[in-house]
């Protein structure tokens, strides 16, 4: 009888050990972080989209500037500053596009955070000087035009910088990030080739834009950008400047004046009315609206829309 009870207790003990052992995590899973996603914060939309294409499902990706908010108008909140303490990677453009970045990084107490200035190593052009009365405002943007991502070759370099940071933070998945970057680089090279081919025979090369955001794009494809305002869309041009733009648009018989999705089309409409032109959108990709994101738009599709708008304007 005692022997039977002993066997019964032994069986029960074995079952309990098997059950508790099966419910617990293996030591290597609890100690290792290879299955954890990198927590990645990006400043504004192009940085977000480049990171998304390189990191895919290995990253937990956050966009700091909300959809539909103009990048020049945003400041980080205390809530975001607090959330950043847990981040693995912070990606920003640089070149004074995010004038708040030093304040943000100075507030973060983290030894693990990798900070990426994505514009490092890109081909830069000087910022376009404008009205004398706006010199101080232009100086806030720095010596160089910050809109580097509008040249697909620069976009490739920015994506490469992001890829390198992901590998630094998560070397186990190096091959994954390398393969994603190569795939995205091929798509950006194809976009660049499409621009070169489809703009090569344009009837005219001149465009008038709301603010001087398109220097990298026009330089890449042999176009000439003439801007109503300088690097900041908040500027107001003088009457003399508007008169100069009116003469320019008439001289080159321009059919379209370009404005941007996240800013008022008022100045572009005033100039268009003055010269008998229409207005059209040329998107600097500083931010997409929530509707555009929900519709599946991204850097490449919006750049293709820009190409279609340019072909129409330059071909009429």
Image (cartoon, helix red, strand yellow):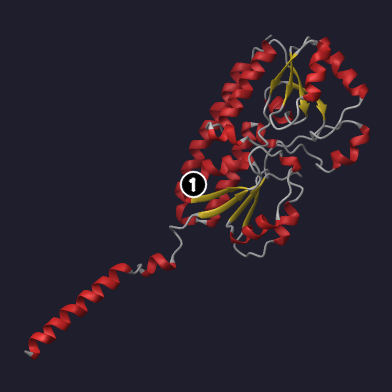
Q: In this orientation, which residue lies closer to the viewer: 315 or 263?
A: 263
Name the outermost residue toward the bottom: 2
Indicate the position of residue 52 as horizontal and vertical percent values. 53, 43
Q: Is residue 246 above or below residue 85?
A: above
Q: Quadrant of residue 32?
A: bottom left
> 224 left or right of 53?
right
Residue at 66%, 57% (x, y): give it: 79
Name the residue tied to disc 1.
177
> Quarter holding the N terminus?
bottom left
Residue lying at the far left of the rendered structure: 1
- In this rendering, is residue 308 above or below 21? above
Q: Is residue 3 left or right of residue 295?
A: left
Q: Which secondary structure lies at badge 1?
A: helix
Q: Is residue 64 above or below residue 245?
A: below
Residue at 77%, 48% in the rendered image: 99
The percent position of residue 179, horizontal first and vertical second, equals 46, 42
Q: Is residue 108 left or right of residue 134?
A: left
Residue 302, quarter of the rendered image: top right
**If the image is split into quadrants, where does the C terminus sit?**
top right
| Count of marks overlaid on the render | 1
x and y percentages locating residue 128 in the rendered image: 82, 32
**Residue at 57% in and 52% down:** 40
């Amino acid at each position: 009888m005692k022997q039977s009870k002993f066997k019964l207790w032994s069986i029960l003990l074995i079952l309990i050990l098997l059950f508790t052992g099966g419910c617990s995590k293996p030591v290597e899973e609890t100690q290792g972080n290879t299955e954890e996603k990198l927590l990645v914060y990006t400043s504004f939309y192009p940085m977000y989209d480049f990171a998304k294409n390189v990191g895919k499902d290995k990253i937990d990706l956050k966009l700091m500037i909300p959809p539909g908010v103009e990048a020049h108008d945003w400041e980080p909140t205390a809530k975001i500053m607090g959330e950043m303490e847990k981040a693995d990677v912070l990606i920003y453009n640089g070149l004074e596009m995010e004038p708040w970045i030093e304040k943000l990084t100075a507030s973060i107490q983290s030894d693990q955070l990798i900070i990426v200035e994505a514009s490092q190593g890109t081909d830069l052009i000087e910022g376009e000087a404008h009205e004398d009365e706006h010199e101080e405002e232009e100086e806030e943007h720095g010596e160089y035009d910050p809109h580097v991502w509008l040249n697909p070759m620069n976009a490739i370099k920015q994506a490469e910088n992001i890829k390198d940071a992901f590998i630094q933070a998560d070397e186990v998945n190096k091959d994954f990030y390398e393969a994603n970057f190569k795939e995205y680089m091929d798509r950006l090279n194809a976009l660049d080739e499409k621009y070169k081919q489809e703009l090569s025979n344009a009837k005219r090369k001149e465009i008038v834009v709301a603010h001087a955001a398109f220097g990298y794009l026009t330089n890449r494809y042999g176009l000439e950008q003439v801007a109503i305002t300088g690097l900041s869309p908040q500027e107001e041009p003088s009457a003399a400047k508007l008169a100069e733009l009116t003469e320019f648009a008439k001289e080159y018989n321009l059919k379209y004046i370009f404005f941007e999705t996240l800013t008022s089309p008022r100045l572009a409409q005033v100039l268009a009315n003055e010269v008998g032109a229409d207005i059209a959108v040329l998107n600097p990709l500083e931010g997409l609206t929530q509707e555009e994101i929900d519709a599946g738009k991204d850097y490449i599709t919006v750049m293709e829309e820009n190409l279609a708008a340019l072909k129409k304007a330059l071909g009429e």
